[in-house]
Image: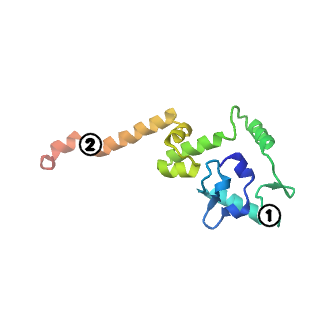
Amino acid sequence: MRNGKIVNLTWDRVDRERGVISLRVLDTKTRRPRQIPMTADVCATLEELHKVRYLGQYQIFVRDGQSIASIKTAFQNALARARIANFRFHDFRHCAATNLRRAGVDTTTAMAIIGHQSPQMWKRYNTTESSDLRAAAAKMNTLITLNTQPAETAVANPAKT
């Protein structure tokens, strides 16, 4: 999700039982509703926040009972403490797209989760690194190894060739 949608997220958008966040037409940039599945960590975090929420406050992310308007300062401080440079909050969307692909999630499903309408936008967010290329070569090697009969076996068992 985009920063603004996370900061403004309300409890009525979160289905803790099903593990999804439901965004309405007015909640999305594309003006299309979508369901975002939550990871186990996100579910656990929201479950803890729900236990200590302010009654009558519908925003999820609050400080001293007041809605948070921005996380810019906190985010910049976290980056400084972690010694991370050249990183924007929006970069998490690129990470999510790439990690969905690496996890083997099909493109259509990943696009629905991220909220991309076109394959061109998906390609822009889904980055490939040298580690991805090495992993592809390793998978190809495994496939070749599994589908190639060793020469000794062919000679030892002429009836099976």
Residue at 58% in and 49% down: 115
Q: Is residue 43 visible?
A: yes
- In this view, the residue farthest toward the right is 64
Of residues 152 and 113, the one drawn nearer to the viewer in this rendering: 113
Specify the amino acid type for callout 1.
Val
Position above or below: 135 against 160: above
Answer left or right for 73 relative to 24: right
Q: Quadrant of residue 36?
A: bottom right
Q: Is residue 105 visible?
A: no
- SS at badge 1: loop
Answer left or right for 74 relative to 43: right
Q: Label 2 belongs to which residue? A: 148
Q: Which comes before the other along the chain, label 1 or label 2?
A: 1
User: Percent from the top left, x then y, of residue 118?
Assistant: 52, 43
Specify the amino acid type for callout 2.
Thr
Residue at 48% in and 50% down: 108
Position above or below: 47 against 154: below
Q: Label 1 belongs to which residue? A: 52
